[in-house]
Amino acid sequence: ETGVTQSPTHLIKTRGQQVTLRCSSQSGHNTVSWYQQALGQGPQFIFQYYREEENGRGNFPPRFSGLQFPNYSSELNVNALELDDSALYLCASSLLGSTSYEQYFGPGTRLTVT
Amino acid sequence: QQQVKQSPQSLIVQKGGIPIINCAYENTAFDYFPWYQQFPGKGPALLIAIRPDVSEKKEGRFTISFNKSAKQFSLHIMDSQPGDSATYFCAASGYSSASKIIFGSGTRLSIRP
């Protein structure tokens, strides 16, 4: 069974730039959720993708957007980067429609905005 | 109310002791209460989880106690080891694996040898 993977591991961007982060879901899972974890805080839900469509969104502005592909992998795009976007970005995969409630997290991408 | 309140913020325990981390929630629609363990530079790893129809769940050295009427739950780590030193997050979510997870603010646990 393949776990959740994310790329890149680390990224440094300048304020105003755009960034794309990638996530491959665990084998057999069909749903990907993205979270932002600021330093010293718990993860905050950004949005979730199922069947290539957004399936719920947290309190994040539209410059945070995403995609899910037919193989269930996903991208998180952030436009017009701000200093406060510096955080660990986590994706979690799960199987919608199963009796299991579990979501499994990847190792994250550390984004630094200067 | 979507918030999950967690305490303490940090905790230091001697090896072999029993650290206890407490959480409280408001939203009675929450139906699933996982605990995650996170080491520096890593993503959260699911440790143990409970549904509100049971009052206690044990997995190895980890025990969740759940009080539905008080809307509180806690994590106990028996015979704690230095390798248990990590940040622990309680969380809550709705009725399916598609539900967003609401995390507590985390407890930084340090187990002294």
Image (cartoon, helix red, strand yellow):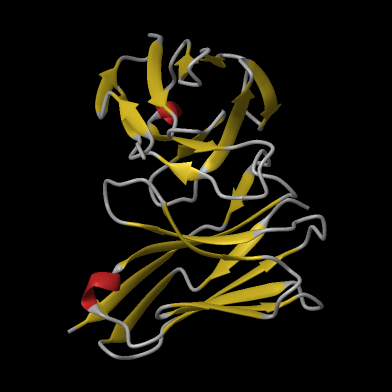
- The image shows residue A111, relative to residue B77, as above or below, that is above
Image check: B98 left or right of A14? Answer: right
Residue at 74% in and 58% down: B31
- The image shows residue A68, relative to residue A40, as above or below, that is above
> Which quadrant of the structure image shows residue A21?
top left
Residue at 69% in and 25% down: A55
Report the front residue among B107 and B34.
B34
Q: Position of residue A87 (x, y in %)?
A: 39, 35
Number of labelled discs?
0
Image check: B88 left or right of A31? Answer: left
Image check: A62 left or right of A114? Answer: right
Q: Position of residue B72 (x, y in %)?
A: 69, 74
Q: Position of residue B13 (x, y in %)?
A: 32, 85
Question: What is the residue that sits farthest to the left in this orientation?
Answer: B113
Image check: A12 left or right of B51? Answer: left
Quadrant location of the C terminus of chain B in the rendered image? bottom left
Residue at 62% in and 64% down: B5
- The image shows residue B16, relative to residue B69, as above or below, that is below
- Does residue A111 appear in this view? no
Report the front residue among B4 and A55.
A55
- The image shows residue B8, relative to residue A56, as above or below, that is below
Q: Position of residue B96 (x, y in %)?
A: 70, 45
> Which quadrant of the structure image shows residue B23?
bottom right
> Which quadrant of the structure image shows residue B10?
bottom left
- Does residue B76 appear in this view? yes
